[in-house]
Every structure is written in structure tokens, then in C-alpha cells.
Image (cartoon, rainbow, N blue to C red):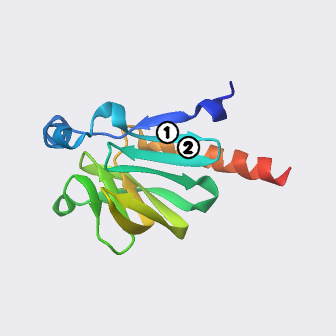
């Protein structure tokens, strides 16, 4: 099995205090991750959020700050931003080329920006860059 088929999994960082509030909603470390696999990015945050985004739709990926006033947990501003955040501080911001339809809880929302509090954001950025380049090369061949 190739690495791309298996996928690379990146844990969403969740503080112990945040975990206490999220467990009743089914968000656990086992169910909060980002996985790069077969040309897609799968994002899971418990049963509240489970979506796939095509790597070719990711325009940019960068480190950003998540403000305290925005809170922890699954978040949306209903204007294109979704946050899957379990810890404050540096997060990964993904900007999509084309907005995608997603479901947060059962509410349909449009998403053009995603914020992820990953345990290893730099490794994720490197891996997503490599996966996008590999996927683009494979499509060109």
C-alpha cells in the first residue's frame, strides 16, 4: 500500500479543558484529525464535521492566529469561515479556490476558509505542499 493511499493523519490539538466540554458532543482525539489521502483532504471533528476537500481546490495554506474571542470547538461565521479549533495559538488557515458546501452539525454552510488547530502545523503545511505537487504531477502525466 502506498503512502498516498494510506494517507497522512494530523491530529487536531485539543487542550484538556476544551476536551471536557467537547466529549459530550462526541469530539475525541480519535475523531479529530486532518488526513491527506488520494488527492483529498479529509477533515473530521467528531460527528459534528466530516468533510472531504479536493487538494486541487486548496489555494493557499499558511500559519495564522486564532483569536481568543472566537472560542474553541467547531465554529463558523456564516460568511465562509469554518474553524475546527481545540486550542488557542497558531492554527493552519486553508483558503479554497472555490467555496465548498459543508455541514457543521447538521447546518449547511458555505466554506472558503478553514482554520485548524493542528498539533504539528509546520509538518502539515509541508505535507500538503508535497501532496498537492504530487497530485498535480500525477494528473499531468
Q: Say which quarter of the image contains residue 81.
A: bottom left
**Residue at the location (33% across, 52% down)?**
84
Q: Say which quarter of the image contains residue 30.
A: top left
Q: Which residue is mark 2?
A: 126
Considering every residue shown, the one lying at the far right of the view is 141
Q: Position of residue 125 (x, y in %)?
A: 51, 47
Quick one: SS at disc 2?
A: helix
Real-space Cα separation, disc 2 to disc 1, in angstroms: 5 Å
**Residue at the location (64% across, 30% down)?**
3
Q: Alpha-carbon neighbours of circle 2 within 10 Å: few (<14), some, or many (≥20)?
A: few
Q: Position of residue 41 (x, y in %)?
A: 53, 48
Q: Alpha-carbon neighbours of circle 1 within 10 Å: few (<14), some, or many (≥20)?
A: few
Q: Position of residue 13 (x, y in %)?
A: 31, 39
**Is 65 positioned to the left or the right of 37 in the image?**
left
**Residue at the location (39% across, 71% down)?**
80
**Residue at the location (50% across, 56% down)?**
61
Considering every residue shown, the one lying at the far front of the view is 106
Q: Is label 2 in contact with label 1 (beta carbons under 8 Å)?
A: yes
Number of marks: 2
Which of 76 and 58 lies nearest the eye of the viewer? 76
In this rendering, is residue 21 above or below 79?
A: above
Q: Which residue is mark 1?
A: 123
**Is 74 positioned to the left or the right of 122 in the image?**
left
Considering every residue shown, the one lying at the far bottom of the view is 79
Which of 17 and 48 lies nearest the eye of the viewer? 48
Q: Position of residue 35 (x, y in %)?
A: 50, 40
Quick one: SS at disc 1?
A: helix
**Is 121 positioned to the left or the right of 85 in the image?**
right
Amino acid at each position: 500500500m502506498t503512502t498516498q493511499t494510506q494517507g497522512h493523519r494530523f491530529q487536531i490539538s485539543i487542550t484538556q479543558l476544551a476536551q471536557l466540554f467537547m466529549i459530550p458532543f462526541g469530539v475525541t482525539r480519535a475523531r479529530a484529525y486532518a488526513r491527506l489521502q488520494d488527492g483529498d483532504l479529509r477533515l473530521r471533528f467528531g460527528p459534528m464535521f466530516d468533510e472531504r476537500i479536493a487538494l486541487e481546490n486548496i489555494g493557499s495554506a499558511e500559519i495564522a492566529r486564532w483569536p481568543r474571542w472566537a472560542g474553541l470547538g467547531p465554529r463558523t461565521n456564516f460568511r465562509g469561515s469554518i474553524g475546527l479549533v481545540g486550542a488557542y495559538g497558531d492554527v493552519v488557515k486553508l483558503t479554497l479556490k472555490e467555496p465548498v458546501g459543508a455541514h457543521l452539525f447538521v447546518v449547511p454552510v458555505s466554506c472558503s476558509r478553514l482554520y485548524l488547530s493542528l498539533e504539528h502545523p509546520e509538518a502539515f503545511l509541508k505535507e500538503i505542499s508535497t501532496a498537492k505537487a504530487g497530485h498535480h504531477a500525477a494528473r499531468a502525466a
